[in-house]
Amino acid sequence: MKNFRRAFTALFLVSALLPGLAVAGETQDALRVLAPAMAATPAPRIGDATLAQPALLAALYAQRDYKPLWTDQDELKALTGAIAGVTGDGLLPEDYHLAALTALIAATDGRDPEQAARLDLVATDALARLAIHLHYGKTDPRAFDPNWNISAPTKPADFLKLVAEVTARDDMVAAAKDLAPHHWFYDQLKKALAAQRAYVAEGGSGTVEAGETLKPGMTDPRVAALRIRLAASGEYTATTPADPNLYDDELVAASKRFQELHGIDPDGAVGKRTVSELNITAQQRVDQLRINLERARWVLNQLGDEFIVVNISGFHLYVVKGGVPVWDTRVVVGKTYRQTPMFKSNMRTVVLNPTWTVPPTILKQDLLPKIARDPSYLASHNIAVVDAGGAEVDPGTIDWQQARRRFPYNLVQRPGNDNSLGRVKFLFPNEHAVYLHDTPNRALFDRADRAASSGCIRVENPMALADYLLTGDTDWPKARVEEVLAAGHTQNIILKHTMPIVIMYWTAQLDRDGTMRFFPDLYDRDPPLLRALGTEKKG
């Protein structure tokens, strides 16, 4: 830094001898020295701000011959206002130098070129970070899931291009704010965040003590607290009853609605799980919404106008077109010990009357032990033993006890009503061997907790999804699809128009009618992301 200070001393001695030099020109000269010096300094600080993107700043200013960006007080005011407003996106103003920037603005009078250059760098660093975070997210999704494959910039040049485009606009601040997702889902999450913050400001919505499960018709002092709690969140709208401690029909209906909105079987019995959800504080819901806004930033700007999204935690699939969901259905996803991964692909193939080749994990852990105990399991489930060349092998020639240690064959379930994949499956390339499919086991769709598969995704209304994907394909009208299904032979249909599909994990999500739902953190993925986002300052 000594060389840096000597360079500045020489620079301003020259400036003093040239009284006709404009202040902007002097600031440009100061930036010519200061920007590269900051890039060469580990964790460089200006005032109370540690620059987040010093190398990017040096490259950006070099592109513009070190001309200052912030020559208008109104632009700086707009920037500090935008930074203060990032709380609406679930971000933290302190990540964008708000306090340091405010202090520098107050201390800079326009007569000191070095001070003006320092302010220019801090303001640009704040703007750059704001633009990147709004467009791609504050955190790197790959730090939380190694399976993540949704494209986002990884090279400094990508970020530089984004920031250069923002700073080239007449209204730089508006251009940066415009990089947040323009999507119905994102907007609704922001509205829900504002509503939860209002609950926080009002002191929250009350709690219900733990105790015996409350069942319809019971009288219990905790019923009064339950009524207050559900009235605060809007599920209970009836008038106060004659007996506030009676768990009456109106309150039972409100409890069922609450359970439905929070991923609990809506039986109206207020037990441990329901009480736990009731007692989640408004601030915890704020944090949950912040987490899911971040996940939305990871992906929504990387998708087009039409795509399929599966929400693992919400056990739901949506078709999105024009930024809004146009169709949805319930799904079954992976168990906690066989988790469905998050990733993006393109839907390419619809398979009618599929066969099912048993995956290695299910083969070793589930089926081979069952067959060793009962060899008739194969015939009763229409399963063939197939060698590497595709030829069927007589199961009677296999020592099934030895097979549990070494099994050189595949098990393939033939098409039929009892096929584990049902009548149709949907293929999209991925390294996880995950796909969507029908299922003969329909009872699971009526459960609130639908984490029951080995990683693949079972779809409640698969034929409606097939109809949607094949719309406009004159080679495959609905009548021909039904003929193939009735015939029972396997048919692969290559889609003429592939559609993006993204497997996501949102623990807060909106229904098509705008109803806010909160879901259990099925795979315990929320806490590490909240830590990475940072805690909001109170007061």
Image: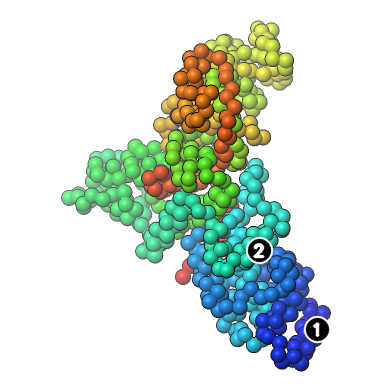
From the viewer's perspective, tell me whether residue 467 is left or right of residue 260.
right
Where does residue 288 sit, x and y in percent of width and height? Answer: 49, 53
Q: Which mark is residue 6?
A: 1
Where does residue 148 sit, x and y in percent of width and height? Answer: 64, 44
Mark 2 highlights which residue? Answer: 164
- Residue 377 visible in the shown view: no
Q: In this view, does 411 lie above or below 228?
A: above
Who's the residue at 55% across and 45% down the image?
Answer: 304
Where does residue 370 sit, x and y in percent of width and height? Answer: 59, 18
Front position among marks 1 and 2: 2
Quarter in which the N terminus is drawn: bottom right
Residue found at the far right of this picture: 3
Who's the residue at 64% across and 18% down the image?
Answer: 411
Who's the residue at 72% across and 55% down the image?
Answer: 155
Q: How far apart are marks 1 and 2 (CA)?
A: 31 Å
Residue found at the far left of this picture: 242
Q: In this view, does 6 lie above or below 177?
A: below
Identify the amino acid type marked 1.
Answer: Arg
Q: What is the quadrant of residue 172 in the picture?
A: bottom right
